[in-house]
Amino acid sequence: MAVVFYPAIIERGAQGFGVTFPDLPGCVSAGGTVQEAALNAEDALAGHLMVMSQSGEAIPGPSMLDGLQSDVEVQEVARILVRADRPGRAVRLNITMDEGLVAAIDRVTSNRSGFLADAARAALSGRR
């Protein structure tokens, strides 16, 4: 996975602060404070890119932060860059695992690879 930084706009809303990503329509986040909104933006971006990748959608590259146009209808508070691991191509692996663990995985999913990838993402997200 390549590390990329997408520009995001934090705006004031009725209930706090919202975050939008100009390059990724539909990718939004929010928070009660500017800092909370900015921190939540990373999770929203990661999830959005993962869903796009799993759906086979083309993932656009990030725009330059300085090139973003202002919207007079938005109460803009800040512009930030949000870090993400851009999904790469799938790589085939050959792993060894206890057969009982494999059986337990098979009882809860029909897609071992997806299950293991999700588990790895969850484990790694706690280490940031």
Image (cartoon, rainbow, N blue to C red):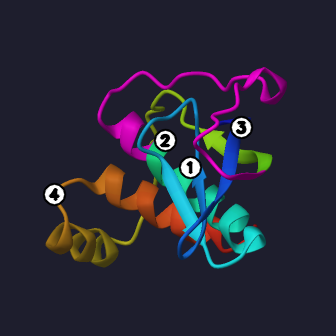
Q: Residues within 10 Å of mark 2 (few under 14, many from 20)?
A: many
Amino acid type, label 3? Pro
Task: State which tag comes first along the sequence, 4 or 2.
Answer: 2
The circle on residue 110 is: 4
- Residue 104: name its quadrant: bottom left
Name the residue tied to disc 2.
Answer: 49
- Residue drawn at x 54%, y 36% is 87
- Work out how far the residue at label 4 is from the one at label 3, CA to CA, in angstroms: 36 Å
Residue at point 79%, 47% (across, down): 80
Residue tagged 1: 45
Q: Residues within 10 Å of mark 4 (few under 14, many from 20)?
A: few
At label 4, the amino acid type is Ser
Q: Name the N-terminal-most of marks 1 and 4.
A: 1
Q: Horizontal and vertical percent for residue 3?
A: 73, 38
* Closer to the eye: label 4 or 2: 2
What range of the chain is rendered magenta? 49-77
Residue 40 within the magenta-colored segment of the rendering:
no
Q: Residues within 10 Å of mark 1 (few under 14, many from 20)?
A: many
Which residue is at a point 72% across and 62% down the rendered structure image? Answer: 38
Mark 3 to mark 1 CA distance (whole Å) = 11 Å
